[in-house]
Image (cartoon, rainbow, N blue to C red):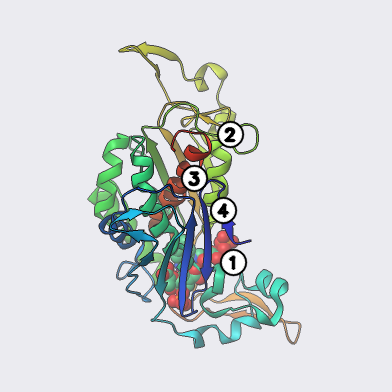
Amino acid sequence: MNRIGESITLTLFGASHDSRIGCVIDGIPPGYPVNVESITADLELRKPSAGIGTPRVEADVPEISGIVDGITTGCPVVITFSNSNTRSSDYEQLRRIPRPGHADYPAVSKFGPAHDIRGGGMFSGRMTTPLVAAGALLRDLIGSLGISVGSYVTRIGSVVDTNTYDPADVLTRSRTNPLRAMSSGIEDRMRAEILVAKSDGDSVGGIVRCFATGLPAGLGEPFFDTLDGEISKAVFAIPGVKAIGFGEGFAAAGLRGSENNDAYRIQNGSVVTLTNHAGGVLGGMSSGAVLDFSVAFKPTPSIAKQQMSVDLLTREDAELSVKGRHDPCIANRGAIVVEAMTVFTLADLALRGGFLV
Ligand SMILES: Cc1cc2nc3c(=O)[nH]c(=O)nc-3n(C[C@H](O)[C@H](O)[C@H](O)COP(=O)(O)O)c2cc1C
Ligand SMILES: C=C(O[C@@H]1CC(C(=O)O)=C[C@@H](OP(=O)(O)O)[C@H]1O)C(=O)O
């Protein structure tokens, strides 16, 4: 089933070169406002940016049904987008000679000749368009609990942003540039890194750091539907995601308990932690601290540089230089998708846990 969620479900349909792509979101309580302008603003952040993104630009105007007079009715909401700017001829040889790093070989093995390989089919980054719209639509729902979600790019290739930022600042500042960087100096260096890889016929990866502020303590279900587990599942749906780490993540393995524990204190009558090594999750539940996790995107698989592949028809080795229109980096475009999957998961868990009715 191409579906995620329990109290709110999201079903994804279409393919990169199909006439339409979209999603069905079921379970949104009635009476919540839907802000089309903020959906459009989030969709803009997913669009490719000239020079550092795929030249395939789609209008990405959402067609939304299931909303009356700007509010949800309690019935499923359907959001669709048309695919107009497709060039399927780029994909003809890939059924025979699969791209290293893309989904071609496992998809052809699984679905046989019926696999829609055009544009990567269902396995395309294109499919993240409806995800972003769904996340944007649900922002107001979790916003009613005081929760906000934002992200920024901490790394593109060898350019790493090691600065510390106030999460509230991240929620707004990283939305001002296509690299999703926190300063214009870092943005320039990240852009240069992408352009150098692109001119080599290559690509680069990156890391997105996501914050959710305003979470009540206790969001997340024991034992299997944990906050970190559910977010990880949703985030791993995003094509190109290879790793996720909450708080210290892998680095926690090298710390002592005395260094990794977040000490409690009472401040203004509330329980607070002095640090946030846990990234806001303990026992699979929100701790009340800021939810803080990082997501690694691999370098885009479709590259012009010649690579070794195989001819699945002749069963011989083959060489491949991928033609067509591709992103030399996906992490910056992926940041808003990470936010969307986080918003979706928080909305679903909030409903499941009785935080929202
Ligand atoms: C927003 C976005 C855009 C993407 N653009 C491209 C692209 O232009 N070319 C490409 O080969 N992969 C692109 N990808 C990544 C592939 O879709 C992904 O690597 C592929 O489906 C294989 O899945 P996996 O990397 O999760 O194993 C993009 C991913 C996202 C999220
Ligand atoms: C169209 C988008 O990105 C596409 C994601 C993608 C892939 O393999 O993931 C491959 C390319 O597809 P095409 O060959 O059809 O241009 C990208 O352009 C988009 O994100 O809107």
Kindly identify the amino acid type of the residue bearing the numbered disc 1. Gly
Horizontally, is 67 left or right of 222 in the view? left
Query: In which image quadrant can residue 253 be found?
Result: top right
Residue position for label 4: 4
Which residue: 53% across, 30% down? 285
Q: Earlier in the sequence, mark 1 or mark 3?
A: 1
Q: Earlier in the sequence, mark 1 or mark 4?
A: 4
Q: Nearer the viewer, residue 350 or 156?
A: 350
Q: CA distance from mark 2 to mark 1?
A: 35 Å
Query: In which image quadrant can residue 91 be found?
Result: bottom right
Whether the residue carrying mark 3 lies under 8 Å from ligand 1 is answered with no
Whether the residue carrying mark 1 lies under 8 Å from ligand 1 is answered with yes
Q: Which mark is residue 252?
A: none
Q: CA distance from mark 3 to mark 2?
A: 12 Å
Kindly identify the amino acid type of the residue bearing the numbered disc 4. Ile
Other-residue count near label 2 (Cα within 10 Å), few / some / many at <14 / 14–19 / ≥20: some
Disc 4 is placed on an element classified as strand
Residue 120 pos. (x, y %): 54, 74
